[in-house]
Amino acid sequence: MGSVDSGADGRPSPCAADPGAEDRPSSPAADPGAEDRTTSATVDLAAKDRPAPPSGLGVYVHMPFCISRCRYCDFNSYAGLDALGPRYVDALLAEARRAVNCRDGLLAARQAASLYLGGGTPTVLPARLLLRLLVKLKETLPLDVGAEVTIEVNPETVVADTFRRLATAGVNRVSIGAQSAHFHVLEFLGRIHDSSRTEQAVVLARQAGIQRLNLDLIYGTPGESGEDWASSLDWALGLSPDHLSCYALTVEESTPYGRAVAAGVQRAPSEDDLAEKYELACERLRAAGFEHYEVSNWARPGQACRHNLLYWTGGDYLGLGAGAHSFLRGRRSWNVAHPTAYLANVEAGESPEAGSERIGPAERRLEALWLGLRLAAGLREESLEALGANQRALGEMLDSGLGERHDGRFRLTERGLFLADAIVADLAAGARVG
Ligand code: SF4
């Protein structure tokens, strides 16, 4: 297959097929967001009291490859496609150049504050390919000095050479899909590693000089006892990460686990079990000196994930790869999901964009409420009022201990954070979203 590196000779990639071109403001007066400004005052008010997004751009690169499919996972990832790796990396680089050339009004002069390689399992690809991707990507999309560069890895896919090469390419943060210390839990989930592989991966990352480390854990798997979860937390803390993400197991209809639950062969996690395990995570991680800064995320002081904060604070990000989403100046867009469709588009010199929408004031208000309350800092009461949050629901949350007032802000308590999705839906029921 020929190279898709259409910008390699210095010629800009063709922009005619750029579906974003018509949305690009040609002048301040033509800015399609201009008419929103008055009505968006309330959103801006709410945005002010969230942490400021990192000033630069976030870049997300989706790697849709996995060695095998886990039983609970509905991510856009595929087993057995890793032979496409070299073409896929070429396509990502071509898409990055296209994005810079065709959306220059949005990306020009913007340094990236974070670069995040996620998946799927990026480390399914050989380290030399990942190195090429990172080096070339940084030539197209320059990074800020001190930018956060994260790669997701699964323990079964890393060897010493992987981390050494990634570190030379500027990777300074690793997120490891550890999930559990217990083999029976990992086996149920369809994971193909055991805890010793996670321990090895942590040692190898540190030996390569990569100090920032996140571990992903899952709680609520059928057969996981309270003691199992407690010991998984203690085991993870013993590996000295600076960040932990703890997710409740969810039942996704399209997965083998989801189908087994629908057929009555497996049971779904019970809400009581999940609530107890969430509470235990809150207690243990607090006692270990971690700050609970978002519903499912804890970090040592100063070690919150800057890339995810950028999503949660309304910052701009560019997504590259199959199914990747972008959000730039109020316009959200997404790429075709399947890797072969993505390759077909990019290799034909076309945009891989499958759709887009401009985020209007009503949706922005809802997002401000949604994102603001998922962060532990919460929102200023003044902002909640401006967003039209349902006062009855607010009062009920205060009465029931799901929310609290602190220093002029309303924030969810730990019990409230566990129920954040339902709570925000309740608060939004009266919000001025129309
Ligand atoms: S390794 Fe991760 S992305 Fe791949 S199937 Fe398992 S959970 Fe999904």
Image (cartoon, helix red, strand yellow):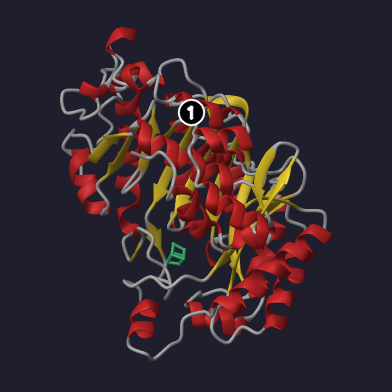
Local SS, label 1: helix
Residue 159 at x, y percent in the picture: 59, 60
Q: Tag 1: Cα neighbours inside 10 Å, few (<14), some, or many (≥20)? A: many
Asked whether 381 or 16 is in front, the reply is: 381
Residue 296 at x, y percent in the picture: 60, 57
Q: Residue at x 23, y 46 (%)?
A: 343
* Residue 343 seen by the camera: yes
Up/down of 328 relative to 218, above or below:
above
Q: Residue at x 60, y 78 (%)?
A: 272
Tell me the quarter of the image containing the C terminus. top left
Residue 392 at x, y percent in the picture: 54, 52
* Residue 320 seen by the camera: no
Q: Which residue is mark 1?
A: 42
Up/down of 231 relative to 134, above or below:
below
Residue 316 in which image quadrant: top left
Residue 258 located left or right of residue 12: right
Residue 372 located left or right of residue 101: right
Residue 128 at x, y percent in the picture: 48, 46
Asked whether 339 or 114 is in front, the reply is: 114
Residue 3 in which image quadrant: top left
Tell me the quarter of the image containing the N terminus. top left
